[in-house]
Amino acid sequence: MSTAPLPFAKGHGTENDFVILPDPDGALDLTAQLVSALCERRRGIGGDGVLRVARAGALVRSGVLAELPAGVAGDDWFMDYRNADGSLAEMCGNGVRVFAHYCRAAGLVGADEFVVASRAGPRPVTLHSWDDGAAEVTVAMGRARLDGRSTVTIAGRELTGEAIDVGNPHLACVVDGLTPQTLAALDLSAEPVLVAGRFPGGANVEILTPLEPDAAPTGAFASHLRVIERGVGETRSCGTGLVAGAVAALHRLGRAAGVVVMTVPGGTVTVTLRAGQSYLRGPSRLIAHGEVTGGFPGR
Ligand SMILES: N[C@@H](CCC[C@H](N)C(=O)O)C(=O)O
């Protein structure tokens, strides 16, 4: 058990909130128990997940990573993402925006364009604006891969969606006739039931309204989305889920490219699909810095 104080920061991207742990040398024993205790909203700091900030090479040396993911360099800053239940995930789109903001504001990087490494590979970021508390960030999220259709049962209702890999697994369900109001009224408290064996590692589930022209006359589309995240439950936003939702909704129109303004309970982001690439643009907020005391559970 460690008694040394553990520095942390707290941030969120469209209210998908994270405990950020600076650990450049990858020395912290980040157990599932410690992650879930930190994310607990009454006894802990509270968060949908943890972002450990470490050099990719240091995580290989300390055994957290078996090897560098393809395209990642040892000196890259690596987003070691953990869900609130302590499980690992390959990617977190809102997390990358907050992670990039943290790295820039903390002086770990000296430029507004750099690469954030993740288990899903490198994710180039652009900070359009930033200060110690607020930033606007675009993340190049890579190619989102459609992988056939499947179903999910939520609160006794079966929905059909597109399985989509955004580095992590999603089932994005565009529901005919769903409006922002009827979406907001859905009870998503029950655990979604996926088809047995279809997603061996589980999946994040998105429910969204069909595309409509965005209110601003820019040629963009608009959609409203809610998400139930693997390893967390319903969250107020999910960046990879927003990309998956945009891909599924455009696919229904026979399109592989387009701009979609996506609204979630925690705010609004813009997803752009172009030439086989996906881009997620939205806000990041850093709201607190502190120290977890030595006697904290899990340490
Ligand atoms: N909130 C994230 C996704 C986090 C990981 C997800 N729960 C999983 O297990 O795949 C995002 O913004 O993308």
Image (cartoon, grey):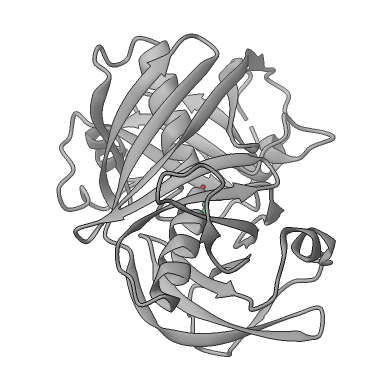
Res 138 → quadrant:
top left
Residue at the farthest front position? 217
Res 252 → quadrant:
bottom left
Locate the N terminus and report the quarter of the image it occupies.
top right
Locate the C terminus and report the quarter of the image it occupies.
top right
Question: Would you say residue 202 is visible in this rendering?
Answer: no
Q: Residue at x 58, y 74 (%)?
A: 173
Residue 203, horizontal then vertical, whole percent: 53, 70
Is residue 250 left or right of 144 when viewed as pictured?
Answer: right
- Above or below residue 32? Residue 258 is below
Is residue 24 left or right of 14 when viewed as pictured?
Answer: left
Relative depth, front residue between 53 and 278: 278
Residue 132, horizontal then vertical, whole percent: 50, 9
Relative depth, front residue between 54 and 168: 168
Q: Residue at x 57, y 69 (%)?
A: 210
Relative depth, front residue between 230 and 52: 230
Question: Would you say residue 72 is visible in this rendering?
Answer: yes
Residue 69, horizontal then vertical, whole percent: 22, 51
- How many numbered dots are placed on residues in this image? 0
- Above or below residue 174? Residue 151 is below
Q: Residue at x 30, y 61 (%)?
A: 257
Is residue 26 left or right of 249 when viewed as pictured?
Answer: left
- Above or below residue 138? Residue 120 is below
Residue 211, horizontal then vertical, whole percent: 53, 64
- Above or below residue 224? Residue 123 is above
